[in-house]
Image: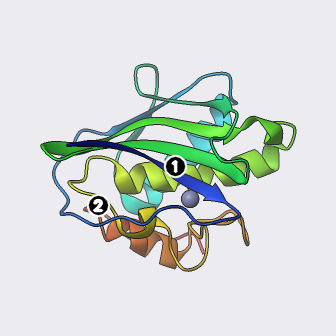
Amino acid sequence: MKQIALICLGLFGCSAAGEGPSVVIPPLTLSPEGIDYALVQDAAERWEQATGLPLLVQAGGAPVRYAPMSYDKNSGETAVHWRSDGPTEILWVHIDERRAHNQSLVGHILLHETGHAVCEHGILGQTEDNCHSGSGLLHRTVVGEPCIDAASLATVCGYRDCQTFSPEC
Ligand SMILES: [Zn+2]
C-alpha cells in the first residue's frame, strides 16, 4: 500500500493520521530551488540544534521551492510518502508563492514546514494530526513567534529519536 499525503500549514485542518515507531535513518536532506538558500539553511540549523538530528542542505534531497498551494488556504505544504514496507520519505516542501514578497513570513513558514519534514522523515507509519501540535510553531495555523517551542519540539521528538531537547522558547 502506498499513500502520499500533504502536511499543510493553513487556516483550516489537514487530515489526521496514525503513528508508528522511529527507526535509524539517514539524514534528512533539503535542496533549495529558487528560494533563499539562507532561509532554508537557517531553518535546518535551528531544527538540528533543537533535536540533535542531522539535517543537510544540499543538492539531491527534497526540493524546497515556491509553488501554488494544493489548497488555497495553505501557506506551506510538505509532501510525505508513507510506505507500508519501509520508512517514510519527504518528497518536497512547498512555500506559497504568494508569500514570496514577505521574507519574514517565508522564514516562519519554512521553520514550520521543516518541523514537519523532520518529524515525518524516516518514520514507520503515519503521525497523529500530521505532527501538528496544540500550540506554538507546529500549530496548524501561523500563530505566535517563529521559534521552536517546547510543545512543538515534544511533538517531533515523540516520533523521532531526538539526541537533545533544546527548545528555543
Ligand atoms: Zn503544518
Tell me if residue 138 can be seen.
Answer: yes
Q: Quadrant of residue 40?
A: top right
Q: Residue at x 45, y 19 (%)?
A: 59
Return the x and y of residue 18 as percentages of the image width and height. Answer: 29, 66
Tell me if residue 166 can be seen.
Answer: no
Q: Which residue is mark 1?
A: 114
The yes-or-no answer for disc 2 within 8 Å of ligand 1 is: no
Q: Earlier in the sequence, mark 1 or mark 2?
A: 1
How many numbered tags mark residues here? 2
In this view of the protein, which residue sits in the foreground, 118 or 7? 7
CA separation in Å, label 1 and label 2: 14 Å
* Outermost residue toward the right in this view: 101
Q: Mark 2 belongs to which amino acid?
A: Arg
Q: Mark 1 belongs to which amino acid?
A: Thr
Secondary structure beneath label 2:
loop
Q: Residue at x 30, y 58 (%)?
A: 126
Q: Quadrant of residue 134?
A: bottom right
In this view of the protein, which residue sits in the foreground, 7 or 153? 7
- On the rendered image, what quadrant is the N terminus found in? top left
- On the rendered image, what quadrant is the C terminus found in? bottom right
The yes-or-no answer for disc 1 within 8 Å of ligand 1 is: no
Mark 2 Cα-neighbour bin, 10 Å: few <14, some 14–19, many ≥20? many
Q: Which residue is mark 2?
A: 160
Q: Are marks 1 and 2 in contact (CB under 8 Å)?
A: no
Q: Residue at x 80, y 49 (%)?
A: 104
Return the x and y of residue 25 as percentages of the image width and height. Answer: 21, 44
In this view of the protein, which residue sits in the foreground, 145 or 90? 90
Return the x and y of residue 27 as percentages of the image width and height. Answer: 31, 39
* Outermost residue toward the front in this view: 1
Return the x and y of residue 10 as percentages of the image width and height. Answer: 67, 59
Q: Classify the position of ligand 1 by quadrant: top left, top right, bottom left or bottom right.
A: bottom right
